[in-house]
Image: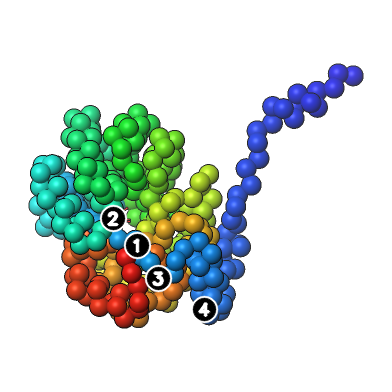
Amino acid sequence: MLDLSHEAAAAAPAVVVPKWTRDAALALYQMPFNDLLFKAQSVHRQHFDPNRVQLSRLLNIKTGGCPEDCGYCSQSSHHATGLAASKLMDVETILTEARKAKAGGATRYCMGAAWRNPKPRDLDAIVEIIGAVKELGMETCMTLGMLDRAQADRLADAGLDYYNHNVDTSESYYPSVVSTRTYADRLDTLENVRQSGMKVCCGGILGLGESEADRVEMLVTLANLPEPPESVPINMLIPIAGTPLAKAAPVDPLAFVRIIALARIMMPTSYVRLAAGRTAMTDETQALCFFAGVNSIFVGDTLLTTGNPEADKDRRLFDRLGLEAL
Ligand code: SAM
Ligand code: DTB
Ligand code: SF4
């Protein structure tokens, strides 16, 4: 009889074993708080100086009028949030803001545009902006919506260091938050960014009405990417009047800290950023986040369309905790 076993084995697709299972992640998440935080801080110390924090600064370079319907967002044209839409900001204004950010200690400049995806004409302007900000000696990050492979390559060639594109929540909860695109669309863009050679910044939001299991599943998705994101922003929802999530129930701060700890353990070498929501957090909650493995924040008094703690407030917090900028 003809033996086909060799050919069959050669043709079989490689079996990819996920690094994390939902059950293993949930078991960690449910550990006693002290055990979870001790583990997270131990992992943190194996890879990072526990007293150093990377500082990023955000700028909204194109505000509002976005055709997507993300339930949390002030910039969606589907929600009456009272935000005036603007055109793409000119490069000189962006540079003035970027210089201020550098003087304030930020090492990375993150620029956001309220687009579903960039158009060809937009991309020409974006390429110019990347070059100009890089000349200041800062790392660059952009978040412009979905990218195809050619667009990702163009941004990579222009020298963009990071691309931010969040999965935001679990795959199963995603359709409750956004209907104009799918989770698979998000993952496609992330793959295009990865293939282009840029670093990936990808995280999510807590407080969208999701369950604790959804939050854990989101981290399983991130940690199981072929390469986990180098940067993982964890946002706490900033409720925006006029959006469907304006009245969403607030997140339990200790549940938030648990998710930070889990992100640190599951993605030990990634920067975990305490992103939106710090204005509404006490110093004590933020201190627990740093202990659980946060080593990056947004500085400056604005995020995209909402507020962020003033420089003085953050300086006092860093002094109280003995933290230093990276
Ligand atoms: N349009 C691009 C996109 O969706 O990829 C980029 C801009 S979008 C504002 C970037 C991220 O900010 C979102 O994915 C979400 O995680 C976060 N975000 C937006 N609005 C927020 C809010 N009200 N509270 C907390 N995080 C928010
Ligand atoms: C991320 O995860 N959070 C940032 C950044 N990536 C682009 C944005 C936070 C936005 C908060 C709401 C606002 O200011 O409009
Ligand atoms: Fe548009 Fe991004 Fe806001 Fe969604 S989160 S509405 S894609 S700007």
Find the residue positioned furthest to the top. Answer: 2
Closer to the chain start, of discs 3 and 4, is: 4
Of helix, strand and loop, which one carries label 3? loop
In this view, which residue lies farthest toward the right? 1
* Residue 308 percent location from the top left of the image: 22, 66
In the rendered structure, are the residues bearing label 2 and label 1 in contact, judged by CB atoms less than 8 Å apart?
Answer: yes
Q: CA distance from mark 3 to mark 1?
A: 9 Å
Corner quadrant of residue 193: top left
Disc sitting over residue 51 in the figure: 3
On residue 261, the disc is none
- Could you give the CA–CA distance between mark 4 and mark 1, rounded to whole angstroms? 28 Å
Q: Position of residue 314 (x, y in %)?
A: 25, 72
Under mark 1, the amino acid is Leu
Q: Is residue 206 visible?
A: no
Q: Residue at x 49, y 57 (%)?
A: 269
Q: Are marks 4 and 1 in contact (CB under 8 Å)?
A: no
User: In what element is the residue under mark 4?
Assistant: helix
Residue at image mark 4: 33
Which numbered mark, 4 or 1, is in the foreground of this view? 1
Circle 1 residue: 326
Q: CA distance from mark 3 to mark 4?
A: 21 Å
Q: Which residue is mark 2?
A: 107
- Where disc 2 sits, the SS reads loop
The answer to which of marks 2 and 3 sits earlier in the sequence is 3
3D distance between C-alphas at marks 4 and 2: 33 Å
Q: Quadrant of ligand 2?
A: bottom left
Q: Quadrant of residue 3?
A: top right
Question: Is residue 326 placed above or below 136 in the rendered structure?
Answer: below
> How many tags in the picture?
4
Q: Residues within 10 Å of mark 3 (few under 14, many from 20)?
A: some
Q: Residue at position x 66%, y 40% from top?
A: 15
